[in-house]
Amino acid sequence: MSAAEQQGKKAPRRRPRRELLRLIERRFELEHLDYLRRIRSERSRTKLSGVMAAGAFYTVFFVAGFTAWKFGAVPPELFGKLSWVMMIPATVFGVTYWLIAGNRREYPLRQQARDHIAGIEGATGLLWRLEPLVQALLAQDMVAQRALEQSRRGSAAIDPEDYIVTIEALHQALAAQDAVASQILQAVEEALAQQ
């Protein structure tokens, strides 16, 4: 091969930031960390069920009061007052139903996310190995610092919302950066090699 041909062909450039992005996508399985989106759709359903429960509660007492008024057991003024006063317990019942139904619907999703995080973190943790990157990109993020500390301790009991928010923020910050300092990338590679 001549010198001109060798100059025309350049060695492929190493792109450590892109490699790190792919590593984060692969190791943390970002497509499985859709917990917040799934919870959001469940929350809207539980709000609707709370409104329906409050409406049903109010309807039962309104029908009972209307029937009593129709048969003359309750004067019209008392029926009018009761129809307004019954809105308070109906609202309390609806809110209570909404909270209980919301927790019951969120619990299986939270357990799935917690199991997935425990599988990723294992006994030795994975997020703490990205500490130089987290310190550089998310230094002011207290949620990220808390998740990082729990990962360092090997605690698989990291709150799923904190963990997912941290991973997504780290991924977005890394994707938005044009370049990351080579010392940071080298420190992350060394930490990942310690496994």
Image (cartoon, helix red, strand yellow):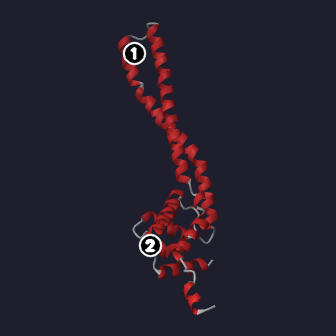
Q: Secondary structure at mark 2?
A: loop
User: At x 41% / y 27%, what residue is drawn?
Assistant: 87
Q: Position of residue 151 (x, y in %)?
A: 55, 68
Please identify the residue farthest to the top as the structure is shown.
72
Q: Nearer the viewer, residue 161 or 83?
A: 161
Query: Is disc 1 in contact with disc 2, using a CB cutoff of under 8 Å?
Result: no
Decide if residue 91 is on the left or right side of residue 41: left
Decide if residue 84 is on the left or right side of residue 62: left
Q: Nearer the viewer, residue 74 or 25?
A: 25
Query: Which of marks 2 and 1 precedes in the sequence?
Result: 1
Q: Position of residue 98 (x, y in %)?
A: 50, 38
**Which residue corresponds to mark 2?**
178
Q: In whole angstroms, how far apart are the C-alphas of marks 1 and 2?
A: 70 Å
Quadrant in which the C terminus appears? bottom right
- Mark sitting on residue 59: none
User: At x 38% / y 10%, what residue is drawn?
Assistant: 75
Q: Position of residue 134 (x, y in %)?
A: 47, 71
* Amino acid tagged 2: Asp
Q: Nearer the viewer, residue 40 or 84?
A: 40
Where 184 sits versus 158, above or below?
Answer: below
Quadrant in which the N terminus appears? bottom right
**Which residue corresponds to mark 1?**
79
Q: Secondary structure at mark 1?
A: helix
Decide if residue 62 is on the left or right side of residue 13: left
* Amino acid tagged 1: Phe
Q: Position of residue 114 (x, y in %)?
A: 59, 57
Where 100 sits versus 137, above or below?
Answer: above
Crowding around mark 2 (Cα neighbors within 10 Å: few <14, some 14 to 19, many 20+) is few
